[in-house]
Image: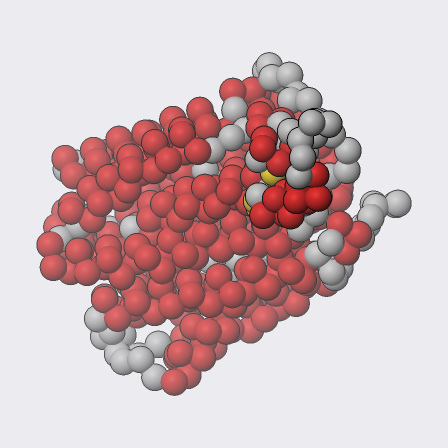
Amino acid sequence: MTQTTELSEAPEQDEQPEQPARPARRALLRLPHRAWSVAAIAFVTIIGAAGFASLPGLLIDPLHEEFGWSRGTIGFAVSVNLALYGLTAPFAAALMDRFGIRKVVAAALVVIAAGGGLTVFMSEPWQLILCWGVLVGLGSGSMALAFAATVTNRWFVARRGLVTGILTAGGASGQLIFLPLLSWIVERHEWRPAAITVSVAALVIVPLVWLLLRDHPSDVGLPAYGADGPPAPRPAPRRGAARRAVKALASASRTGSFWLLAGAFAICGASTNGLVKTHFVPAAHDHGMPVTAAASLLAVIGVFDIVGTVASGWFTDRFDARRLLAVYYALRGLSLMFLPILLDDAVHPPMLFFIVFYGLDWVATVPPTMALCREQYGEDSAIVFGWVLASHQVGAGVVAFVGGAARDAFGTYDLVWYGAGALCAIAALMSLVIQRVPGAKTASATV
């Protein structure tokens, strides 16, 4: 579906002499639907958010060396960040219904900039927990995947799986951009300039969001992409955002599908953000690999993550989301089982194979999970997905702490890698037993 300029839609007058030329003029003035530009702004915003998520794994060794804090203590601060990232998401989705996407996302970016900037003055562990754990966690949670779900649900009827995959890939794109830069800054100029860099990046995005992002298609006089008929009126703001978020949770929690989705997604977070994103760099460094090289490998995961996530969105539009999730989790668990024997002081072909294989699977789980929430919970699906995402981040937070504590206790991360691989096998089984809603349309029906 496309939109046209006012010139192309002006009523034709009888006195106008060149009637045959008008169809050609209208064709020349056809523009892409505004939904795609809104998705592009959301994509850029999510890229920026990835910068905030990329830094914690690079701070573990520098903070340990400068302040003498244990890796478990630093991991706890990261776990608070990850847990709040997830727990904030459902409330942020409800707040976007109440106040609009622009206001919520712009405020979140300011909170992130404040939290990241204040870390340069810290001297005690509680300050790390407050600044990076609480402030950055709350801010980044407001731009979590529930933000992507809200944009997709409002602006798209067709191609939802593909758009979900593209927006999810924004996190991988940001990781690809920020990780090498931040690792270089940490290695050459210590960690404080890196924290300032992510704070500045957050502030730079604020005017972009405020000026260019729109809340609803009706704001610009258009129907959603792929919708039939005239533009739907803008829905009235829904009051009681917190109450609505809790009500959606109470309703969804009475279904078995919610617990299966939440449990599987908790394992997803544990095996990605909590383990690999947080502990891969220090684990590789334990084996003698330079920090910059390890961070570059993590960034390369982001390259293939983009491919895998966009492809997963395309698959989700065409195949059963349950089977897709089962395949993704099973392959991820298999790859994690091999990681302890692949880590070395240099980058070898088997390690590169792991990076490619794992990268393709990193967040490929998001489009089918979001599609299942949409199928199961209808208009509350963005909020319910926020709660499912909360379980993802709680799982990530638990493993971020457990991984650091296990390294302190055993001097190695090996047991954590094996445990995460076993959990992924359980997530694959959980995905297969999710029940389809009677009468629900298949994904391909919206292609």
Residue 8 place in picture, x, y as percent: 62, 36
Residue at 77% in and 38% down: 228
One can see residue 245 in this view: no
As rendered, which of 417 and 190 lies closer to the eye? 190
Nearest the camera: 358 or 401? 358
Looking at the rendered image, the quarter that the C terminus falls into is bottom right
> Is residue 294 something that shows in the picture?
yes
Q: Residue at x 66, y 67 (%)?
A: 327
The picture quadrant where one finds residue 192 is top left
Image x and y of residue 207, in percent: 34, 31
* Residue 193 placement, left or right of 281: left
Q: Residue 87, relative to residue 421: is it above or below? A: above
Q: Nearer the viewer, residue 281 or 231?
A: 231
> Residue sitting at 26 percent across and 79 percent down?
345
Position of residue 314 in the picture relative to residue 54 (left or right): right
Q: Is residue 445 above or below residue 128?
A: below
* Figure quadrant of residue 247: top right
Please state, as top left, top right, bottom left or bottom right, where the N terminus lies in the image.
Answer: top right
The colour scheme of the drawn protein is secondary structure
Q: Residue furthest bottom?
A: 349
For image coordinates 66% across by 39% down, the residue present is 18
Q: Residue furthest right?
A: 439
Q: Position of residue 370 (x, y in %)?
A: 64, 47
Name the side, left or right, on which 206 lies relative to 217.
Answer: left
- Vertical position of residue 169 compared to residue 8: above or below: below
Residue 9 in the image: state x and y as whole percent: 65, 32
- 73 relative position to 335: left or right: left
